[in-house]
Image (cartoon, grey):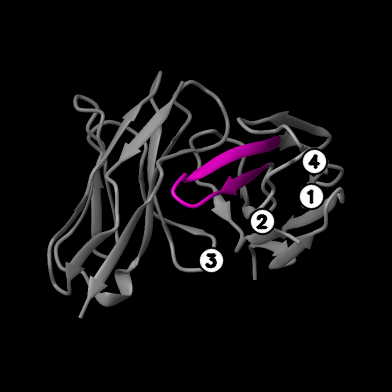
Amino acid sequence: DGGITQSPKYLFRKEGQNVTLSCEQNLNHDAMYWYRQDPGQGLRLIYYSQIVNDFQKGDIAEGYSVSREKKESFPLTVTSAQKNPTAFYLCASSPYNFKNIQYFGAGTRLSVL
Amino acid sequence: GDSVTQMEGPVTLSEEAFLTINCTYTATGYPSLFWYVQYPGEGLQLLLKATKADDKGSNKGFEATYRKETTSFHLEKGSVQVSDSAVYFCALTGGGGADGLTFGKGTHLIIQP
């Protein structure tokens, strides 16, 4: 089946630790996105990538990093610099056209131990 | 910058009631407008979209019309079911050529039998 796979579904981070969230898509989409969802605040854009080896900061990029070495993969690292990482993280992809639909994965819930 | 405002929730209705969830937006250019739905613990699913003024998006009995004169995209359904209980997000993209979706804060809809 075509779609977006995020893993793991649940993730726990210890103080000072970096953690990486996986996002893989087999839709052959050019663009990929990471959003953070907090209760009552909707979704906010962290990073996006329009093509391989290129990515741009979104509205809340501080404390996060990404890479785009392959078209189908867009991992997100939550670094120790992110002081409030507890949230629901959603990955999305779309064909490269800013008016097109974005398709979402099922999300990863990150909590701090 | 772009922004989306939607009515505060939770909205509680009885089964078979008429639903309206208000959404207004601020954007430069000519954005595309979307309604996404999120069921508990899941990612977002596209519900409907409209890409130009006066377009009507529809799906699963839900409808929304792109009103440029009032910068609105209100979601309506004539007869809601318990299975419609979810969080609904209004979103836009492409107004100024930027990537990523701009979301409203979400409206939690609860349908009682």
Highlighted range, magenta: A32-49
Q: Give the chain letter at badge 2.
A: A
In the displayed orientation, state which residue is furthest to the bottom. B113
Q: Tell me which amino acid carries mark 3.
A: Glu
Q: Which of A50 and A16 is in front in this view?
A: A16
Q: Is residue B110 above or below residue B9?
A: below
CA distance for labels 2 and 1? 16 Å
* Residue hosting label 4: A66
CA distance for labels 4 and 3? 23 Å
* Residue hosting label 2: A27
Q: Is residue A104 above or below residue B32?
A: below
Q: Is residue B73 left or right of residue A61?
A: left
Q: Give the chain letter at badge 1.
A: A
Q: Is residue B72 above or below residue B61?
A: above
Q: Nearer the viewer, residue B13 or B101?
A: B13
Q: Which mark is residue A75?
A: 1
* Secondary structure mostly seen in the magenta stretch: strand
Q: Which residue is drawn at 54% across and 33% down?
A: A98
* Residue B38 falls inside the magenta stretch: no
Q: Tell me which amino acid carries mark 1.
A: Pro
Contact flag, marks 2 and 1 (Cβ < 8 Å): no
SS type, badge 1: loop
* Residue hosting label 3: B42
* Residue A46 falls inside the magenta stretch: yes
Q: Is residue A27 above or below residue A77?
A: below
Q: Tell me which amino acid carries mark 2.
A: Leu
Q: Which residue is drawn at 61% across and 45% down?
A: A35
Rate crowding at label 4 as few (under 14), some (14 to 19) or many (20 or more) other CA atoms within 10 Å: many
Residue A113 x, y percent position in the rendering: 76, 61
CA distance for labels 2 and 4? 20 Å
